[in-house]
Amino acid sequence: MNILPYYTGKQIDNCRAKCYNKQYMKKPNIAYRKVILVIFLIFFAAVAGFMAQIISQLPDVSSINSYLPSEATIIYADDGQVLARLHEEENRQVVPLSKISPNLINAVIATEDKNFYSHHGIDLAGIARATVRNISAGRIKEGGSTITQQLAKNLFLTKKRSFIRKISEAILALQIERRFSKEEILELYLNQIYWGHNAYGIEAASFLYFGKTAKELTLAEASVLAGIIEAPERLSPYKNLTLAKKRQKIILVIMVRENKITLDQAKAAYTEELILHPEKIRSRGQIASYFISYILGNLMEKYGSDLVYKGGLKVHTTLNVSMQAHAERVIDKFIGEEGKKYRFSQAALLSLNPRNGHIKSMVGGADFYKSQFNRAVQAQRPPGSSFKPFVYAAAIEKGMSPGTILADQKTTFHVYPNKWNPKGTWAPNNFNKKFNGNVTMREALERSLNIPTIKLLKQVGIAQTINMARRMGIKSKLEYALAISLGVYDVNLLEMTSAYGVLANRGIRAEPIAITKILSRDDIILEENKPKETRVLGNNTAAVMVDMMKGVLQRGTGYRGRLLREAAAKTGTTEEFRDAWFIGFVPQLVTGVWVGNDNNKSMKGVAEVAVCPRLWKAFMKQALKDQPALRFEQPEGLVKIQICRDSGLRPHEYCPKERILSAQYFKNDVPLSSCYFHTIIEEEEEEELEEIDKELPEWLEKEDRDFE
C-alpha cells in the first residue's frame, strides 16, 4: 500500500522550487560569513600590527630602575636652612615616600586616582565614568588617566594629546604595574610631576609654597598642593589665592567622600590660615645673593654646569643666616641714609670666624639685581692705612717695642724715579696735614700717622713687610716701594679680613672656607673642607699687635666704632677719599667693611664722620649680641716705664712734665740712659743768664741807634 501522499504535477513543481530556493539562499549566507571573517581577520591583523609597531617603539620601562631625574642642587646655611636651589628649568629634590606627608598622599590618591591600589595600570571604570561626564558636559571635563598612566606620560611620552599617545600611555602603564610596586610608582609620580613656578616634585613644591619639607605638610597645605596638580600655573596660590582656595575645598570634599578624612577635619583644614613662603617665589631680595654667586662660581669650576644644575648636589656652607640678614640690613641702611650725603653708592661687608676661617656673612654691593659684581671678593682696591698693621707687625717681630720713638715731621724721601715721579723724591703728608713731633710706635698706629709709618718701614725693611703680608694672607700683587706702607696697592676685602684674623687667632692663620661639605644626590661625600691652620706669627707678636690696635678703638681714628667689649681694629682711607675701610675683630669674629664708588669718584666727609667704623659697629653689636664677651691674650715680656718724648730716654728732673709719658718696651729694648735733650743748668749759669736777660733790652736799643 502506498503510504506517500499523492502530489499533482503542479505541487511537485512548487516543491522543487522551494527546495531550490532554500539551497540558493543557503549558499549566499555562507559566503557572507566568510567575507565577514576575512574582514575581521584583516582588521585584527592590522590592529595587531599597529599595536606591535607602537609597542616596538615604546621605551623599556625597566630603564626606570636607572632613571635619574633632573634634580636641583641645594645650598644650605651653617644651621641647615636652605639658602638656594640651583637648577635650570626643573627645580626638584627627590625624596622617598617615607618623607612625604600622609596628608598629601591621601589627597593626591583621592583626587587623581581613587582606585590606585586596586587597578593594574588602567582603570576601566574610571574611563567610563569620565566618558559619561564629558559627554554630558559637552566638553573634556574629566580625564580617565590613572596615576600610573600619568607617570608613564611624564617619564616617556610627550604632552601632545593624540590617540596614539593614549594607547602608548596605557601600554606603558600596564608594563610599569607589572614591574614596580604601588609604593614605588607613587614615589616616582610625586617626585616627577610639575607643581608650578619651576617646582618639580613634592619636596620642591613644599619648600616653594610653604617653606617646609614634604613630610611636614598639614592637611590644609596638602589639599592646596593636591589641587594645584590639575593646572599648576592657574591654580597657584601666588597667582590666584581665591581660585586655589576654591580648588582646596573641592579636594577636601572628595577626601571626605572617599573616607580619607572626616567632615570636621575638612572644615578645620579649609578655615586654617595658609602661611605662604613668598621670599622663595619673589624675584628680588633673596638672602645672601652675593654669597650664593660666590659659591656657584666655585661649584661650576669643580663640577660643571650639568652636575650643578641637574645633579642634586647638597652643598653645606658656613654662612650664618642671622648674621647675613643683619649685614644686608646694615648695608642697605647706610647706603640709603648716608650714601647720597657723603657721596658713596656702594659698600661691602665680609665677616668670618678667625679660628676656623668660616665665612659667616658676605655682602658684595648695594643691590645684587642691579650689579652682580662682588665687591667683597672681586673688587681690587687700595686699602690705605688699613695696610699699616703689616708694617707694625714686622717691626714687633723684629724686636721693636710699642714705646719706640718715631719722628713725625715733614720729611722728603728719596725713591726710585718713575714716570709719575721723575725726580725720585716723595714728601707725603699726614691725613690732617699736621706733624706731631716725636711719637711712640703705639701712638703712630692709633692715630694712623703716615710719616712715622714710612720711617718705621725703612727700619724694618720693605721685603720683611711684604713677607709679613704674604704670610698673613695677602695674595694680591705688592710692589717693592716705600708707598706700600700707606696701602697704595690693590687688594680685596676677603684677603684683608682674613689676614686680620691671624691677629685675632693668636698668630694662627685659618684659610677662608665657604663650603664645609658637598654630598651627591645619594648622600655620598664628594668634598669635605676642614680648617687649614698654619702658625704664621708668634703668639706674643700677635698679642702685642692686638694690644696696640685696641687703642685705635679706645682713643684713635676708630673711636666711633667702640664696642662694650674688647675689640681691636684699623681704619683706612685712600688718596682723595676714593675708598674707606674699617677692619676690626673680637676673639671669635673678624669683620671688614668698605665703602666707595664703582667709578672711583671721591667721597665727602666719610673719614670725618667715621662712616665705616659706625657701619662696622652697627653690624658687630647685632652679630655678637648672643655671644660671650671674650678677652684677648695679654702680651708677655713688656715692661712699662716713663720716657721723655723728646729723646725717647729716661726722664730726669729737668724734663718738662708735659713731655713725659708712659711707654711699653721689651726688656731687651728698655732705654737705660737719661734724656740728653733737656740740658742740666748750673746755678751760676742760671744767674748769668738772668743778668743777660735784664741787659738785653738796653743792648738792643743801642744796636738800633747805631744802625740808624
Image (cartoon, rainbow, N blue to C red):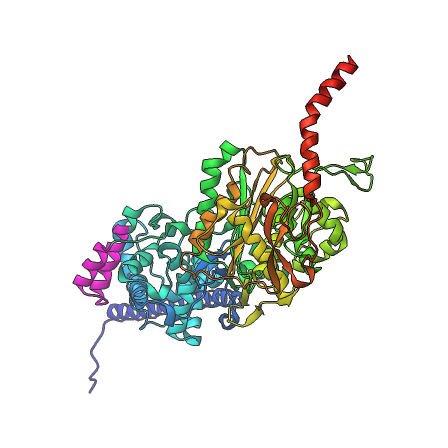
Q: Give the range drawn in magenta.
A: 245-272
Instruction: Give the residue displayed 68% in from the left and 39% down from the top.
Output: 686
Q: Please determine whether, in this image, residue 344 is positioned above or below residue 535.
A: above
Q: Nearer the viewer, residue 220 or 83?
A: 83
Q: Where is residue 680 in the image (x, y as percent from the top left)?
A: 69, 46
In the picture, measured across the screen, residue 527 lies left or right of residue 265, that is right
Instruction: Work out which residue is located at the far top of the displayed protein and give it.
Output: 708
Magenta stretch: includes residue 434: no
Is residue 708 toward the left or the right of residue 546 in the image?
right
Is 306 in front, or is 178? 306
Q: Where is residue 606 in the image (x, y as percent from the top left)?
A: 54, 37
Quadrant containing the C terminus is top right
Q: Residue 531, can we see it? A: yes
Vertical relation: 383 (above or below) 419: below
Give the dominant element type of the magenta stretch: helix, strand or loop: helix
43 above or below 247? below
